Amino acid sequence: MFKIHGKYLEATSEGLAPPPSTLMDRAHIALEEPSAVLEILFQFIHPPSGSKCYRQPDVRSFGPDIFFAVAEAAEKYIVFGAINLCMTRMQSVLSSHTQCIADTSSFNSQLTQDYPVDILRHSCKHGYKDLADIIAPHTLSYQLGAVAPKLSTILYHWVRSISLGSIHESNIEVHRLSSQVVYYDQWQDICRDVDSHIWKSKSMECRRALMWQAKFNHQFAENPLFIFSPLSFSKLPSCKAPKPCPCGNLPELFSQLAAKGRSIPNFSSIAFPPSG
């Protein structure tokens, strides 16, 4: 059981503070979050007794389960300090981000590398559009079966980036589910372009082109954003196919793929369509 003075609730939380002129009794109020989460959350509200130099919890020390549970509770009860610190940690990926798609070296946050799906879920649920745009490409290497359980409310958007027509679903959760799915599919269309180019240009006879295709698909599966970096496929075999061989057009193809990647709409334009 936690005891918190009303003056601290009024100063630090909009969701837990009672309305003005509310008559308070001594009845206990049950909250659904685990005590381990509430104990941390309340440290952003009520300082320890007798403390003269109190610092709020360091969210960087939390494990992922506790971190995202505290972040969710902070949003639910509008605990200002906890919201700000949790978002600061998740938004560390924005520190050197000046465009919607930037060099992947900006994404040096361990939280971003290991838990992009959780960050995307949180950012979409609570309307953090900039964060959703930046973290969404980092979920593309995940299999749909791993994404669906965590993004059941926004999976619609993750796969819906290929069709940008008006969305008429009244159920916002169904809308988000579809968008998440389409977003994934539009990025995967880049891989399909590579396979189609190799087939249509009759590059199947060129070992260099086939190795280029294999390296591209492997790197794209690990991190699709690599297409925005300079191409550096080393140790490609020499071309022994009859000249002129289509493998000479591969640098141009790579440039076209990068341009196509830049044309893919931001995730937020699908997950948060304009109203009206």
Image: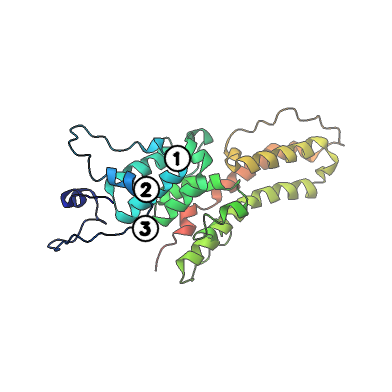
Quarter that holds the C terminus: bottom left
Query: Relative to 213, is 126 on the left or the right?
Result: left
Task: Name the disc covering residue 139, or none.
Answer: none
Q: Is residue 102 above or below residue 232?
A: below
Give the labeled residue for mark 2. Answer: 37
- Rendered residue at 69%/49% (across/down): 193
Residue 257 image offset from top left, x and y in percent: 63, 45
10 Å crowding of disc 1: few (<14), some (14-19), many (20+): few
Q: Are marks 3 and 1 in contact (CB under 8 Å)?
A: no
Crowd rating for badge 2 (residues with CA inside 10 Å; few <14, some 14–19, many 20+): some
Q: Earlier in the sequence, mark 3 or mark 2?
A: 3
Amino acid at circle 2:
Val
The mark found on residue 63 in the picture is 1
Residue at label 3? Answer: 32
Query: Residue 223 placed where, x, y %?
Result: 60, 40
C-alpha gap between disc 3 and disc 1: 20 Å
Q: Is residue 55 above or below residue 39?
A: above
Q: Nearer the viewer, residue 258 or 248?
A: 258
Q: Amino acid at mark 1?
A: Gly
Q: Please identify the residue farthest to the left as the structure is shown.
A: 21
